Image (cartoon, rainbow, N blue to C red):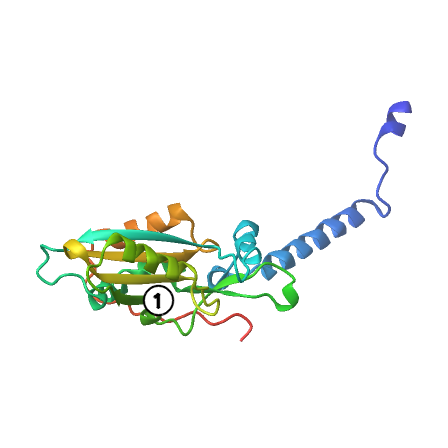
Amino acid sequence: RTAERSRSPRTPGGSGARAGMRAAGGRAASRRRARRPSSATLTAMQRMTGLDACFLYMETRTVSMHTVTVLVFDVSAAPDGCSIEQVRRFIARRIHRVPRMRRRIMAVPLGLHHPVWIEDPAFELARHVGGVRLAAPGDRRQLEVLVAQLLSTPMDRERPLWELTVVEGLEGGQVAIVCKVHHAMLDGGGIAEVVQQWLASEEVETAVDVWAPEPVPGV
C-alpha cells in the first residue's frame, strides 16, 4: 500500500483524458511548426546582431563608426592603366559573390528591436564606386589628406554602407583604392574576405550578374 501511495496521481478521466491531452499537444505543436517562416522569407531580411547595432547607436555627428582600407597598386606597366570605369566593370562581374554589399539597413517600427538588413531596391553601383584624380605631384601627403576628407563624411543610411574611391594621379604611376565600410556591416577581417572574393578567379564568370532585389518587408 505504501508503494501504491508513492506513485504519481492518476489523471482525472483515465487513459482517455491523457490521450486527448497528447492529441491536443500534438495539434498545438503542428500549428507552431506551420507558423515558422519559410526559407524564402528568411532570406528577405536579416536581423542585425546586437554588437553590430551598437556601432550604429554609438555614431554621432562628430564620431563616425566606419572603417577604411587603402590599397595602392603599381599600374605603370599596365597598358590600359586603372580607371574608375574599369573598376566598376570589375566589381559588377563579382558583386553577386558578396550579397551583403547590396543590403542596407531598415529600422524596425517604434524601435522595438534592432534594425534589419534588406536588399536595396534602388541599388546602383555608380553610387558606391567613385573616383578622384590628384593634382601633381600626387604624393603620399595628398593621399592622406584625401583619405581624411573621405573619413570625415558620414555615410547615407538609406544605401548600403560602403563606398569605394579610385584615386588616380599618384606619383610613380600608382593608383589607390580607398575602401570605406561601416563597422556595422563589416570589420577589418570582413573587408579582407570581400577583397579575396572579388579577386578570386573568374574563369566560369563572363557575364554581368542579372539581379533583382527581394521585396522590401512590409511594403
Q: Quadrant of the N terminus?
A: top right
**x then y, percent, for residue 61:** 53, 62
For mark 1, give the secondary structure: loop
**x then y, percent, for residue 20:** 75, 52
Residue shown at the point (64%, 64%) measured from the top left: 111
**x then y, percent, for residue 2:** 91, 23
- Is residue 203 in view from this perspective? no
Left or right, residue 71 beside residue 40 = left
Residue shown at the point (56%, 66%) measured from the top left: 107
Residue shown at the point (52%, 52%) measured from the top left: 52
Callout 1, which amino acid? His
Left or right, residue 183 beside residue 170 = right
**x then y, percent, for residue 210:** 29, 70
- Is residue 26 in view from this perspective? yes
Left or right, residue 196 beside residue 63 = left
- Work out which residue is located at the far right of the displayed protein and give it: 1
**Quick one: 32 or 67, which is closer to the camera?**
67
Residue shown at the point (41%, 58%) measured from the top left: 151
Q: Classify mark 1: residues with Cα within 10 Å, few (<14), some (14-19) or many (20+).
A: some
**Quick one: 12 or 121, which is closer to the camera?**
121
Q: Quadrant of residue 175?
A: bottom left
Q: How many marks?
A: 1
| Residue corresponding to mark 1 | 128
